[in-house]
Every structure is written in C-alpha cells, then in structure tokens.
Image: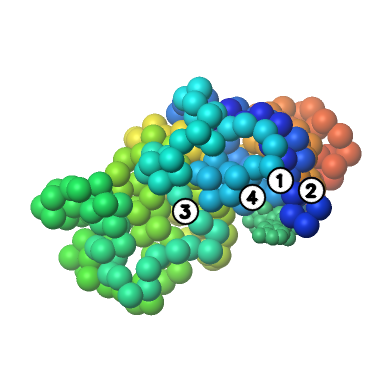
Amino acid sequence: MIRADELVKRYQGHVVVDHLSFEVQAGETLCLIGPSGCGKSTTLKMINRLIDPDEGIIRVKDMNILQQDPVALRRTMGYVSQQGSLFPHWTVKQNIGLVPGLEGWTKVKILERTRDLLDLIKLEPEQYLGKYPLELSGGEQQRVSIARALAVDPPILLMDEPFSALDPLTRFELRREFREIKKKLNKTTVFVTHDLQEAFLLADHILLMDSGAIMQYGTRKELQEHPANEFVRSFINAQVNEN
Ligand SMILES: Nc1ncnc2c1ncn2[C@@H]1O[C@H](COP(=O)(O)OP(=O)(O)OP(=O)(O)O)[C@@H](O)[C@H]1O
Ligand SMILES: [Mg+2]
C-alpha cells in the first residue's frame, strides 16, 4: 500500500532523514519510534506531502506521490498532527465536517456522519456537536482530531503521537479504543510514537529510528528477541525498565 525507497531529507545541510526505506501493507499498522528529533514527524509528513524529500520515492498503491496533486493525495489520508490542529473558532461539528464539506457532501449526510463518528469515539453527540475546542479537555480534543481524520473514510491514517499529551489512564483508554476502531475500519496506518509500550500494543511492524536512519524494522517479537544492535537493545531495556 505504502512503499518508501531511500528517503533523504536535509535541513541546512544537516541530514535528518537518512536513506530510509519501509513498506506498509494494506490494513497494517506501522509504528515509527525513536528518540526526540530522530526524524519521525518529518518522515510522516513526507507521506502526505506536507514535506517533499530531497531524494527518494514514496509510492502509494504503486503510484509515485510526487507526481500527484498534494491536495487530492491528502484526501485519501487522514492526518492527526503532533500539535493537534482543530480550528479554534470552529465547533466540533464544523471541524469534523470540514473535509466532507469540501468533498461536496450534503448537510444532512455530513451531520449523520459526524454523529456516527462521535458515537465511535464515545462523545455524546448532543453534548459535543456545538462545543468549541477550548471547551474540550485535551483527551476530548484528541478524540475529535481522530474523528476528523476519519471523516471521509480515507484508506490511510497518519497519526503523529496522537495520545502523547494525555494522562496515563486516558491514554490507556484511547489506545484500546483506537485498537477497536482500527479492527472495525481496517485502515492502513502509520503511527508515530516514542513510547515502546504503545508501539507494542498497536503495531504490526515497528520501525525504530535514530538520527534519521533505521536501527531495526520488525515485529515486537523480533525486536525483543533479536535486537539488531546495541542501540535497539538499550532503547528497549530503557523503556521496559522504566515501566
Ligand atoms: N523545518 C525545519 N527546519 C529545520 N530543521 C528542522 C525542521 N523540521 C525539523 N527539523 C529538524 O529535523 C530533525 C527531525 O525532526 P522531527 O520533527 O522529524 O523529529 P521527531 O522524531 O518527530 O521528534 P519528536 O519526537 O520530538 O517529535 C530535528 O533535529 C529537527 O530539529
Ligand atoms: Mg515529532
């Protein structure tokens, strides 16, 4: 479904993504994980062309995305950014209905879809439709961002640390809900996190990065049982011992 070959991104001559290659099969979740500044968000943003690589190719369904219109491309990919980006002067209903509106859906259909999505993320529609982002808790904002990303039912989801700003209990609940949602909707997902437990819980495959380069690509079992090098071993040990 998604295939990246030898991606390179430089800023001011400094390599931040270093010949990165990976593949995500349809319906699979790939977790990008690694220390702060290792290039996870940059890599994710290259998939929906918020950033274009200096070298390398990304193909989605065998088509080179650099030859596609970025706006059309993004309609096929729900995106939850690291900063959370609900429009502050728009209600929950307006935020979730944004992309369906751009796609020319009728008002009735948009409202119906918005209610279904609020049910899915367990926010009572009557109570939440008219609220503004500032009237929501952090966890509720995260849920609404996820609902917005799902609105037009895109086949691909790109999620950049969507649960990172939450308390452990809310994070735990949202992860479980997300796993259920994923099972129900069968999305191809690239999920950024720096939390190994989260990656273990959600990922089919994990791509562990350091300084823009791949340290190891594999399943949870492969990383745990056969760490590729000392970096992988210490990354896993540090996080396992922390918990
Ligand atoms: N627009 C930019 N201009 C210059 N340098 C940038 C820019 N965006 C990112 N960088 C640098 O590229 C590197 C990778 O950044 P990126 O945001 O991809 O890291 P990350 O792995 O997502 O980190 P975090 O876990 O903290 O979110 C960092 O060193 C960052 O300072
Ligand atoms: Mg980031």
| Disc 3 versus disc 4: nearer the observer | 4
Q: Look at the numbered discs 3 and 4 and tell me whether their residues touch, using CB distance below 8 Å.
A: no
Residue lying at the far top of the rendered structure: 62
Mark 1 vs mark 3, CA separation in Å? 21 Å
Q: Secondary structure at mark 4?
A: helix
Q: Look at the numbered discs 4 and 1 and tell me whether their residues touch, using CB distance below 8 Å.
A: yes
Q: Which numbered circle lies on residue 80?
A: 3
Question: Looking at the image, is mark 2 or mark 4 earlier in the sequence?
Answer: 2
Q: Which numbered circle lies on residue 145?
A: none
Instruction: Identify which residue is drawn at 43% across, 40% down.
Output: 69
Mark 3 vs mark 2, CA separation in Å? 25 Å
Mark 3 vs mark 4, CA separation in Å? 14 Å
Residue ID for mark 2: 15
- Disc 1 CB within 8 Å of nearest ligand 1 atom: yes
In the drawing, does residue 233 fall left or right of residue 94? right
Residue ID for mark 1: 9
Front residue (pair 14, 97)? 14
Crowding at mark 2 (Cα within 10 Å: few <14, some 14-19, many 20+): some
Question: Looking at the image, is mark 1 or mark 2 earlier in the sequence?
Answer: 1
- Answer whether residue 61 is visible to the viewer in this image: yes
Residue 221 higher or lower than 112, as above or below:
above
